[in-house]
Amino acid sequence: MASEPRVAGSPLDLIGGTPLVRLDSVSRRAGAEIWGKCEFLNPTGSVKDRPARLMVERAEAEGRLRPGGTLIEGTAGNTGIGLALVAAVRGYRCVFVIPETMSPEKIQFARLLGAEVQLSPQVGWDDPRHYSQVARRLEQELDNAVYLNQFDNPANLDVHYLTTGPEIWEQTGGAVDAVVMGAGTGGTISGVGRFLKERRADVSVVLADPEGSVYRPWVESGEPRAEGCSILEGVGIGRVPGCFDRDVIDDALTVPDQDAVDEVYRLLWDEGLFVGGSSGLSVAAAVRWARDAGRGRRIVCNLCDSGARYRSTLFDADWLARHGLRRPER
Ligand code: PMP
């Protein structure tokens, strides 16, 4: 069956409009209808292409970013890669600060796209070496430079309210019972959740949280305290940022890393989908939530980025073993 091929005037016009795919074997396991939003099909391979574009467009429109300027961001990698795409098309320089524990593939991809990458140690938000603090200082030091600050930049939530949420609504014909997603900045779940709830107040918005994140405790008790730690990239956080809208979250589940990893391999072997750890987190949480909520629900998960980004980590048995995790058996 042929589908309508897309024609785009610029690579930036390829951002968004991602397909929704039914996950058959996951649905059977969950006793529900589970669908995946294919954000890994954005032009650089992740959901963060969406906010990258809108954050730059708003900075331009507000006059904060002038021609030839420099984009600065603190990022787990995907936002930086998305910004490097926008910068390539629009002629900006990029300087990113990325924690050294992020996958080598992401750091390499950002550099290949022309970004200058500084690595930061994995330290708390208050530490001056934390990537957000280094990025903030760089903005002061460099000329015509803008720190985009995805964590508190309203464009990062708005883009999902304006695009991802409406796409899910349209793709499901409004018949969606729940969305289950991880949160890094919280922009995706907050923007999608806000849009869907305005359409249908009874849509459940479910946060899938890794160990060591303050989000679930914050949602449940108002106390942002974290226990444990996780190898999942781009999800979970040590402080609650401006882009996280607690009011739209109905429920939160913590998913152990091994469950997320197991789900990544099941998506690969049972569905033929090569996606990263936060996608496994989202799907594993959806299966758990569906079993508790009762049969037959229609649930949308977020397939946030490509597995190619984690070849040397999630898809390497030795790396997994070094991090106390098991590579599942087929
Ligand atoms: N998954 C991955 C792989 C990501 O890079 C991100 C972005 N940090 C997310 C999920 C979560 O997206 P958001 O920042 O919108 O919460």
Image (spheres, rainbow, N blue to C red):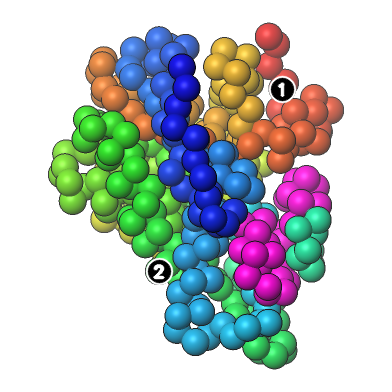
Q: Residues within 10 Å of mark 1 (few under 14, many from 20)?
A: some
Q: Is residue 97 above or below residue 13?
A: below
Mark 2, ligand 1, within 8 Å: the answer is: no
Tell me which corner region of the image, top left, top right, bottom left or bottom right, holds residue 130.
bottom right
Marks 1 and 2, how far apart at CA: 39 Å
Please identify, in this view, whether the residue under mark 1 or under mark 2 is nearer the observer.
2
x, y percent for residue 120: 76, 65
Q: Amino acid at mark 2?
A: Pro
Q: Residues within 10 Å of mark 2 (few under 14, many from 20)?
A: some
Secondary structure type for disc 2: helix
x, y percent for residue 87: 65, 67
Which residue is identified by label 2? 154
Task: State which region is magenta.
Answer: 81-110
Residue 119 located left or right of residue 263 = right
Residue 134 located left or right of residue 29 = right
The residue sitting at 33% across, 55% down in the picture is 161
Which residue is identified by label 1? 326
The residue sitting at 37% across, 32% down in the picture is 300
Q: Is residue 124 above or below residue 310?
A: below
Q: Amino acid at mark 1?
A: Arg
Secondary structure type for disc 1: loop
Q: Nearer the viewer, residue 7 or 82?
A: 7
Q: Is residue 305 magenta?
A: no
Q: Determine contact: label 1, label 2, CB under 8 Å.
A: no
The residue sitting at 32% across, 34% down in the picture is 171
The residue sitting at 73% across, 49% down in the picture is 106
Q: Nearer the viewer, residue 108 or 264?
A: 108
Image mark for residue 91: none
Looking at marks 1 and 2 on the same chain, the residue that comes earlier in the sequence is marked by 2
Q: Is residue 91 magenta?
A: yes
